Image (cartoon, rainbow, N blue to C red):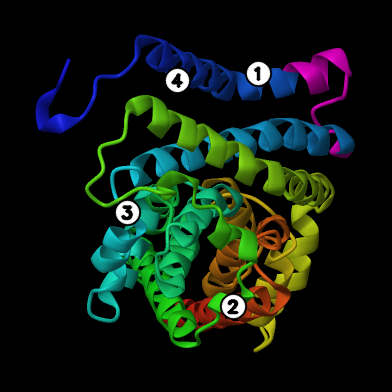
Amino acid sequence: MATQAGIPPVDRRDLALVAGAVLTGWILFTQLPAIADWLTYSLLAFDRDDHLGQSLNFFVYDVPKILLLLSGMIFVITLLRTFVTPEQMRRWLGGKREGVGNVLAALVGVVTPFCSCSAVPLFIGFVEAGLPLGVTFSYLVAAPLVNEVALVMLLGMFGWQIAGLYLLSGLTIAILAGMLLGRMGMERYIEPFVFQVKVGTKGQRPDERLKWHDRFSQAFDSTREIVGKVWPYVVIGIAIGAGIHGFVPDDFLAEALGKDTIWAVPLAVTLGVPLYSNAAGVIPVVSVLLDKGVALGTALAFMMSVVALSLPEMIILRRVMKPRLIAVFIGIVAAGITVTGYLFNAVS
């Protein structure tokens, strides 16, 4: 039985399998906070103020969350790639005038509510699909750095001027960082397996109409292969982030950053790198820092560093990037955040 546009119908068994996987994943995802709380505070009987309990709760919640997002995003990206070849994607984003693709990728990053580690799967998919490296970096920076929840919270706490400056500075950092990295020609520092995973388009002609069974099979295969290579780095990265999350007190940060010196902003960026949180999660910490006298630009530089340059993210990225590219990425983004911190301090 033919369908419109020549696309074969979906086999009911394939549809039931995919729908069942999506439903199971969604139920598990929505119940993760309750599961983490039950395991940490009921079964293991940790006190909610206990640092070890907070770290364990963070780890139990975040590891399955990131792995579920990783699996879901890779599956969706691979499935979509069976309809659009890498050459078409490259022409759409990579073939545009310099900077346009970076702007589009940064805007996609703004509307995707991902923390730094959650943004990595889509970054992998973009690189593996053949998009220009600079364009994919604009997405990787913007996704955690400019968060719509953070924008709303900044708007309520500090007004539209600060929220707007945060949005503009985050987009500027993402776009310029991507353009600069794109011009440096560092594709050779991406791990070879990322380019070798071509499951979604293997043997496919641009005009070929695949059956849905083949599309689903390719998506499952690609998901299993990439997640199988990346998951140990996810676990290690989240474990480090969980430990720091539970044991680094706000008072320590306020004391370290409260000194009104020229080194306050670079120090805030440096201290933010080992930590791990999303923008919405770190904003209450920013509020505490401001209440204790830390300058606005210094506090926001700390927040940007936490969400865009977290150590767990770098550990996960190490599976797909070589150290030199990670170092260049960190240096460029850290420089942009530092400039933004000084700018905020100057206008606030």
The disc placed on residue 85 is: 3
Quadrant assignment, res 287: bottom right
Q: Are marks 4 and 3 in contact (CB under 8 Å)?
A: no
Q: Are marks 2 and 1 in contact (CB under 8 Å)?
A: no
Query: Circle 1 is placed at which residue position?
Result: 34
Three-letter code for the amino acid on which mark 4 is drawn: Val
Per the rendered image, the range of residues in magenta is 38-51
Q: SS of the residue at dot 2?
A: helix
Horizontal side, residue 39 vs residue 335: left or right: right
Three-letter code for the amino acid on which mark 2 is drawn: Arg
The disc placed on residue 188 is: 2
Estimate the spatial distance between the alpha carbons at disc 2 and disc 1, rounded to whole Å. 43 Å
For label 4, the crowd category at 10 Å Cα-Cα, with few meaning under 14, some 14 to 19 and many 20 or more, is some
Which residue is pictured at 73% across the width and 59% down the height? 315
Which residue is pictured at 69% across the width and 48% down the height? 230
Q: SS of the residue at dot 3?
A: loop
Relative depth, front residue between 78 and 109: 78
In the image, residue 146 above or below residue 327? above
The image position of residue 15, as x and y in percent, is 38, 16
Which residue is pictured at 43% across the width and 57% down the height? 129
The nearer-to-camera label among 3 and 1 is: 3
Estimate the spatial distance between the alpha carbons at disc 1 and disc 4, rounded to whole Å. 25 Å
